[in-house]
Amino acid sequence: MLLLQPLMGLLLISLAHGGYCPILFSPVDVVVEYGDSFSVNCSSTDKTHQFGLKWEGYDTMENTEEIFRSVDVTDWEMKLTCYMYSNETQCSQDLPVTIYKTPDSVSISIVDHSGPMIEGKRYELQCDVHDVAPVQDLTVKWYKGQTLLNQTTFTDASKTPVNETTTLLIRPDRADDGAQYRCEAVLELGAEGPQYPIESLETLSAEVHYKPKHFNSIETIIKNDEVTLNCTVKANPAPTYTWHSEHLKEEISSSVLQSSTVLLSPGNYTCTTTNSLGSDSKVFIIKSTESQCPIQLIPRRAVVRYGDDVSADCKTSVPHKGMGWEASEGAVPMTRDSLITWRVSNLIEWDIQPFCFINHEEQCQVELPVTIYKTPDSVSISIVDHSGPMIEGKQYELQCDVHDVAPVQDLTVKWYKGQTLLNQTTFTDASKTPVNETTRLLIRPDRADDGAQYRCEAVLELGAEGPQPPPKETSDPLNITVYYASKITFCNSWSPLTGTSLDSHPLNLYSVVGNPRPDISWRHKASSVNSSMPLTKFDSGQYEIIASNDHGDFNCSINITVEYPPELNCSESYEVKEKTFFKFPCIADGLPKPKFSFYKNGKIIQRDFYPNWTDSGRYQLIAHNQHGTINSTFTINILHAPVFYVSQQNFVVGEDSNITLECTSTGNPEPEMWWSLKNKNISTGRRHITLNIERATSSNAGVYTCSATNTFGRKDKSFVVEIRDDSRNYFPIVALVLGLLVLILLIVISLWVRKNTTGLYEVGTVSGAV
Ligand SMILES: *[C@@H]1O[C@H](CO)[C@@H](O)[C@H](O)[C@H]1NC(C)=O
Ligand SMILES: *[C@@H]1O[C@H](CO)[C@@H](O)[C@H](O)[C@H]1NC(C)=O
Ligand SMILES: *[C@@H]1O[C@H](CO)[C@@H](O)[C@H](O)[C@H]1NC(C)=O
Ligand SMILES: *[C@@H]1O[C@H](CO)[C@@H](O)[C@H](O)[C@H]1NC(C)=O
Ligand SMILES: *[C@@H]1O[C@H](CO)[C@@H](O)[C@H](O)[C@H]1NC(C)=O
Ligand SMILES: *[C@@H]1O[C@H](CO)[C@@H](O)[C@H](O)[C@H]1NC(C)=O
Ligand SMILES: *[C@@H]1O[C@H](CO)[C@@H](O)[C@H](O)[C@H]1NC(C)=O
Ligand SMILES: *[C@@H]1O[C@H](CO)[C@@H](O)[C@H](O)[C@H]1NC(C)=O
Ligand SMILES: *[C@@H]1O[C@H](CO)[C@@H](O)[C@H](O)[C@H]1NC(C)=O
Ligand SMILES: *[C@@H]1O[C@H](CO)[C@@H](O)[C@H](O)[C@H]1NC(C)=O
Ligand SMILES: *[C@@H]1O[C@H](CO)[C@@H](O)[C@H](O)[C@H]1NC(C)=O
């Protein structure tokens, strides 16, 4: 059974308590597409009291644990409210509802422009998003290919669908020719919202016009059998090419010159590339390196791992008297063949220098460069002259040791922090045999480097003839610990509940940084505070929080307001004069400042009022804030002047009758009462006084007064007593009857006299006179 009727409850909603209402929705909030439906339960977390719940617009109140509602979303401004009524609280809560609509369309265009763009000029792209809600959750993103260029959010508070237009300024360059621009509308509504962005229907494919530009304006080519001068360069619109040279009989229009089609003697060849936006030139210099010796080595250079096998062919196309390989290993004696092969199956000689010779017109020879490599036995990383954690801001030296590697001139030692390349070292030492190398890296770690991983890597870059990818060895990672000074990243004010200790301040957990973990201490009013002591309501004020470790202290000021549940101090009873302003009597406290409800007989009433004399009774005051509810019951005693109750006041009786005059009054304090006649006191009493007149005579007739008085006033009430005479005098009636008879006689006589004296009056006139 509910204590309060629904109607009464509705009346009380306006008096609902501030922010606090123990209503829980499931789900907690709703994100729903316009036109869809959802359902929600409303329940109360406060199961300690009887309560009833009610959805707005539904007449019936239910006192079940949960009430259910299913809603079709057809109103953008929809509001759904659940009310709770208990014998101690009445309040309501709005369900947070977000209604969304995905855009009808998203389209991209160029503002005031059509056709290709020109490199370096500014253009404006426009994205139109049609019919989307709510706009404050909308993000419009611009992309070029996969790259996010910019994004826009909106602050408009509108709940209904809107159209939005955003623009993006671009200054395209040659790399942007063919780039795909698009925009995307995303409604960021969390897990319950739409999960995919709505992309613009078509992408905008940028055509950018730009003039030709060569990377190098001069290129030198060593002439071999075949020469290709390739002047091809990108430009839009497509460029035309012209070649000039003292060695060319005429201009040639082609992007490429090849010695297979044109005779290209050593010298300078200038290529000019032109399109509608401009032109650029490039000079090719052909130099001759005609070998004196008519033999060819395949490969021209050998790269071999120490201990592996190696081979190279020596070939000629000219007639000769003999050719051969000269080498400390694998030498081939002179022969008449035109293809001979040098081969070693297990190359362990670091300093081998093979060459092929031929007896042509005279003897000549070509050397085969041989690179013998050996990957390192080990690569290791260490800290120079230091162990243990590092200190922020100080300088340290890391060392990388590479053992037994060859050839050192092809070695690169790379330093990494995580995936980031920090530096690299190459070596100029000409040694061909394995060496040990040590490189060092200076670092000055900061707090972000705490936990960072350093490593070094040895790579042998052996060129195109070498193994692919180049062989490399990596050290074990070196994890570093960095000690750094304390810091507090934010200092907000804090409002804990009384009984909470400073140790549970959330700042301690999240925003105090330092390595090692700083110690936290507190100061208040210039002295230190025991942070595990529970705070009392008298402890509010400015506090200083100090974070300290060996590497530095940090402090900041925090305003702490200790909140506490309501407190009420009421007397057992209060006395108040009627019709004087009654002010809420108890001493009350609480933080946040409590809200009060004042009840009499279970009905809420104004806290300050002008009481009537009938308002005495028991009252209840309830104080509430988010930390609790307290009540106090007390008596209010209304003091007032006497008031008479209704009783018979007029008495008309015959002689010898018995009369009883009754007079009753109330008043606070209880009034004193008395009867008087003609200012003479007859009897006195309290509350209810009676006056008995036995066998009344005419001497008892008169006006009796009942009086009541107390400290707040005096009231009088008059009683009239008449005594009737039984020997009645009929003279007045007889006189009246005789009078009337005389009057009628006189009228009759006068009419009769008039008729006989004139007799000329017309009938109508006569009747009119009658
Ligand atoms: C509402 O409550 C009922 C009964 O407790 C439960 O079956 C239902 O799943 C709840 N619905 C939601 C949306 O929480
Ligand atoms: C409200 O209801 C609860 C639970 O039935 C009861 O313990 C409490 O005394 C009631 N309070 C009042 C003011 O009637
Ligand atoms: C992104 O757009 C905003 C205006 O929408 C502009 O103020 C800002 O400069 C732009 N940022 C970039 C990197 O283009
Ligand atoms: C959005 O644009 C469409 C088409 O241009 C128009 O029909 C509609 O009324 C616009 N909506 C708003 C909210 O301006
Ligand atoms: C010339 O160079 C371009 C690219 O720079 C290349 O696509 C083209 O195939 C080359 N032409 C010849 C004949 O090598
Ligand atoms: C890389 O190391 C070389 C010495 O090996 C040094 O001269 C150079 O300053 C370093 N560069 C950086 C960016 O640390
Ligand atoms: C390289 O170091 C190792 C171990 O320290 C040593 O045995 C070896 O002789 C060194 N090699 C050279 C070439 O110094
Ligand atoms: C701090 O207060 C806690 C709890 O009141 C107490 O146990 C502890 O001994 C106090 N510490 C100091 C240093 O006074
Ligand atoms: C707090 O910091 C200020 C300035 O950094 C310093 O002057 C003050 O002494 C510090 N207070 C404490 C208690 O460490
Ligand atoms: C009033 O307070 C008493 C205890 O102080 C509690 O038992 C009672 O339920 C409270 N009544 C209301 C209506 O809050
Ligand atoms: C009548 O009695 C009342 C109360 O005892 C007293 O106040 C009042 O003065 C008396 N009046 C006369 C006329 O004696």
Image (cartoon, rainbow, N blue to C red):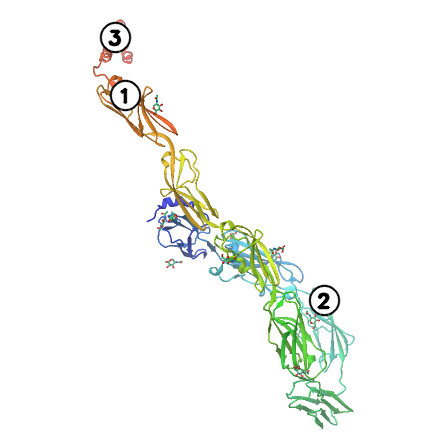
Residue receiving disc 3? 746
Q: Is residue 150 visible?
A: no
Screen quadrant of the C terminus: top left
The residue singled out by tag 1 in the image is: 721
The secondary element bearing badge 1 is classed as strand
Image vertical order of residue 479 relative to residue 137, above or below: below
| Residue placed most toward the observer, 302 or 578 | 578
Q: Residue at x 60, y 58 (%)?
A: 554
Q: Quadrant of residue 107?
A: bottom right
Q: Picture coordinates of residue 678 (x, y %)?
A: 32, 19
Q: Position of residue 710 (x, y in %)?
A: 37, 29
**Front-most of residues 695 and 278:** 695
Relative placement, left or right, of 756 versus 168 is left
Q: Is residue 201 left or right of residue 612?
A: right
Relative height, residue 709 to residue 498 (above, below): above
Q: Earlier in the sequence, mark 1 or mark 2?
A: 2
Q: Ligand 11: does it lie within 8 Å of the C-beta at label 3?
A: no
- Residue 215 percent across, percent down from the top left: 70, 70
State the CA–CA distance, disc 3 to disc 2: 149 Å
Q: Position of residue 98 (x, y in %)?
A: 47, 55
How many C-alpha atoms fall within 10 Å of the one at disc 2: few (<14), some, or many (≥20)? some
Mark 1 C-beta closer than 8 Å to ligand 11 = no
User: What is the spatial separation of the Cα atoms under label 3 and label 1, in whole angstroms?
Assistant: 44 Å
- Identify the residue under disc 2: 279
Q: Is residue 28 shown to the viewer in this render? A: yes
